[in-house]
Image (cartoon, rainbow, N blue to C red):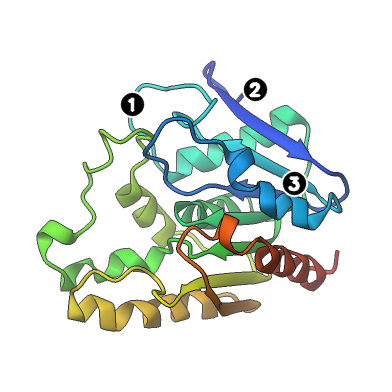
């Protein structure tokens, strides 16, 4: 447990050694009892301790403190930065973001560009998703208040809008697209026809960006740990480390 400010303590577990440090950013959690360590264990085991691998749990999740009030992606990035400082784990970092964690990796890397040397996104959320809201019915759009009663209390709506205004550093970026479903469809033709093009534009915004289709469910960590470990290794090599 590490104090990230205001008396808030977050749980983190790190294993392995060497540089860079890989940080696992988990997806949105709506059920109690989640363990980031267990969720990422197959990836960590596949890497075999060659790099330091850190799994942490955001506020209101797993073993981390419950905190009153709603928070956003910027707050989550600030928490992570304070967590790494408190644990004495210095950059460089490679961010491994799953689902919502992919969006938070975008926000963190843009907020602390000198810390990050590469990113891998596992079917991750991306800023351009929110730009398609106008083409879908109002009841299917991101709602500013929809996450207030969730377990985590992290506003996806706010995080998406924050991310739209942020530019990550020019680092190697691999996006793993879970197939055959791809990014979740909504049953709205205008959205479903456009979303993969918007995703491709996002990946192309990284000069060192690439997208790979992977046969996997959306929750990729357990399904394809070997593939994920291979992409992490490739990103580290592309970063020159």
User: For numbered disc 1, what is the local secondary structure?
Assistant: loop
- Rounded to the nearest angstrom, the CA distance separating label 1 from label 2 is 21 Å
- The residue nearer to you, when weighing 138 against 32, is 32
State left or right for residue 41 relative to residue 212.
right
Question: Split into 4 quadrants, where in the image is the N terminus?
Answer: top right
Q: Nearer the viewer, mark 3 or mark 1?
A: 3
Q: How crowded is mark 1: few (under 14 residues within 10 Å), some or many (20 or more)?
A: few
Q: Which of marks 3 and 2 is nearer the N terminus?
A: 2
The residue identified by callout 3 is 53
User: For numbered disc 2, what is the local secondary structure?
Assistant: loop
Q: Position of residue 117 (x, y in %)?
A: 72, 60
Q: Residue at x 84, y 49 (%)?
A: 49
Q: Earlier in the sequence, mark 3 or mark 1?
A: 3
Q: Residue at x 21, y 41 (%)?
A: 145
Q: In this view, does 59 lie above or below 165?
A: above
- Rounded to the nearest angstrom, the CA distance separating label 3 from label 1 is 30 Å
Q: Residue at x 54, y 63 (%)?
A: 122
- Whether residues under marks 1 and 2 lie with C-beta atoms below 8 angstroms apart, the answer is no
State left or right for residue 69 relative to residue 50.
left
The residue identified by callout 1 is 69
Q: Position of residue 148 (x, y in %)?
A: 26, 35
User: For numbered disc 3, what is the local secondary structure?
Assistant: strand
């Amino acid at each position: 447990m590490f104090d990230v400010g205001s008396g808030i303590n977050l749980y983190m577990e790190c294993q392995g050694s060497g540089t860079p440090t890989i940080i696992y950013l988990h997806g949105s959690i709506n059920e109690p009892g989640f363990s980031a360590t267990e969720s990422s264990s197959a990836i960590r085991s596949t890497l075999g301790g060659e790099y330091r691998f850190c799994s942490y749990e955001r506020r209101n999740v797993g073993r981390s403190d419950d905190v009153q009030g709603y928070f956003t992606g910027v707050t989550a990035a600030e928490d992570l930065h304070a967590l790494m400082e408190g644990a004495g784990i210095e950059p460089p970092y490679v961010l491994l973001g799953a689902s919502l964690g992919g969006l938070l990796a975008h926000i963190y890397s843009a907020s602390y560009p000198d810390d990050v040397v590469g990113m891998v996104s596992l079917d991750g959320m991306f800023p351009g998703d929110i730009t398609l809201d106008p083409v879908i019915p109002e009841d299917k759009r991101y709602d500013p208040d929809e996450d207030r009663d969730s377990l985590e209390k992290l506003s996806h709506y706010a995080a998406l809008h924050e991310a739209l205004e942020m530019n990550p550093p020019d680092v190697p970026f691999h996006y793993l697209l879970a197939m055959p479903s791809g990014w979740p469809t909504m049953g709205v033709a205008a959205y479903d026809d456009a979303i993969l093009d918007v995703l491709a534009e996002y990946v192309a915004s990284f000069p060192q960006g690439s997208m790979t289709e992977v046969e996997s469910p959306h929750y990729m960590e357990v399904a394809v740990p070997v593939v994920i470990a291979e992409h992490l290794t490739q990103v580290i090599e592309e970063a020159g480390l």
